[in-house]
Amino acid sequence: MRTQRVTVRFNATALKETTLSVAQAVTTAVSFLRAYLTARLSPVLGDDAGEIASWVVVTALVVAAAIIIVGIVVTKLTTTATNIQTP
């Protein structure tokens, strides 16, 4: 029995063109989705960038105050605990 050889030619140019075409399609789709989401979420999130900075400052101040208060409470509890007289 005789086998036949099949020659497969690899066309790199066609593969490159197909890859570029797919990459352009994906890039276009991602750009469209990004623009769509930005347009839909802008009214929800708001456009005031300065407002976010003020919330960050307020949050940082509240966290700092909470840390200071916890430190004071722990100090008071440890001093009170060391001052308890045992019989």
Image (cartoon, helix red, strand yellow):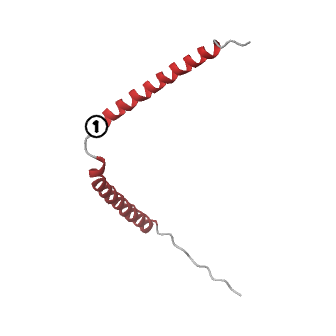
Quadrant position of the C terminus in the picture: top right
Q: How many marks?
A: 1
Amino acid type of disc 1?
Glu
Percent coordinates x, y for residue 11 in the rendering: 47, 69
Query: In the current view of this chain or complex, which residue is farthest to the front?
Result: 87
Percent coordinates x, y for residue 30 in the rendering: 36, 58
Seen from the viewer's position, the closer of residues 32 and 7 is 32
Percent coordinates x, y for residue 5 in the rendering: 61, 79
* Residue 22, image quadrant: bottom left
Quadrant position of the N terminus in the picture: bottom right
Does residue 87 sit above or below 59 in this rendering?
Answer: above
Q: Is residue 25 left or right of residue 82?
A: left
Seen from the viewer's position, the closer of residues 62 and 20 is 62
Query: In the current view of this chain or complex, which residue is farthest to the right?
Result: 87
Q: Measuring 25% from the left and 44% from the top, which residue is drawn there?
A: 47
Q: Is residue 2 left or right of residue 80?
A: right
Does residue 72 sit above or below 25 in this rendering?
Answer: above
* Residue 84, image quadrant: top right
Q: Is residue 28 left or right of residue 14?
A: left
Seen from the viewer's position, the closer of residues 36 and 85 is 85
Numbered disc 1: secondary structure: helix
Percent coordinates x, y for residue 44 in the rendering: 30, 51
Q: Measuring 68% from the left and 12% from the top, which residue is drawn there?
A: 85
Q: Measuring 27% from the left and 36% from the top, which residue is drawn there?
A: 50
Reading the image, the residue beneath label 1 is 51
